[in-house]
């Protein structure tokens, strides 16, 4: 059951690849030089994906590694921003 939502602000991604280095099971670089969420859903120019508790640590590390803070995680139970 999904407890968290990852949001990627794709247009602001600078393509440094930090997220893909720390969490390659969820993140990969695309041909446009930016990252993408593996299995994520496109929402306008951004991407999002719901994840469970077991995937939070890996994605939180990816978000924390991003130098331009384009990865956001929200707790779906209380709608609070994790990062």
Image: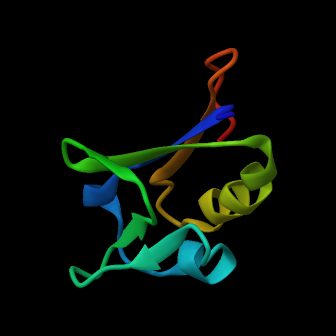
* Residue 40 in picture, x, y percent from top left: 41, 54
Identify the residue shown where x is 73% and y is 54%.
55
State whether residue 18 is above or below residue 71.
below
Chosen colour scheme? rainbow
* Residue 25 in picture, x, y percent from top left: 61, 73
* Front one among 24 and 72: 24
User: Left or right: 49 with respect to 19?
Assistant: left
Identify the residue shown where x is 55% and y is 65%.
66
Quarter that holds the C terminus:
top right
Quarter that holds the N terminus:
top right
* Residue furthest out toward the front: 1
* Residue furthest out toward the top: 78
State whether residue 71 is above or below residue 32.
above
User: Left or right: 57 with respect to 44?
Assistant: right
Residue 36 picture quarter: bottom left
Identify the residue shown where x is 73% and y is 62%.
58
User: Left or right: 46 with respect to 19?
Assistant: left
State whether residue 79 is above or below residue 25.
above
* Residue 10 in picture, x, y percent from top left: 31, 57
Q: How many discs appear?
A: 0
* Front one among 16 and 43: 43
* Residue 13 in picture, x, y percent from top left: 35, 65
Residue 44 picture quarter: top left
């Amino acid at each position: 059951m999904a407890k968290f939502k990852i949001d990627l602000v794709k247009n602001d991604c600078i393509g440094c690849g930090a997220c893909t280095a720390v969490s390659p099971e969820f993140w990969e670089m695309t041909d446009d030089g930016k990252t993408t969420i593996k299995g994520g859903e496109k929402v306008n120019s951004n991407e999002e994906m719901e994840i469970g508790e077991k995937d939070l640590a890996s994605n939180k590390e990816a978000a924390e590694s991003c130098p331009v803070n384009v990865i956001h995680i929200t707790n779906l139970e209380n709608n609070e921003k994790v990062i």
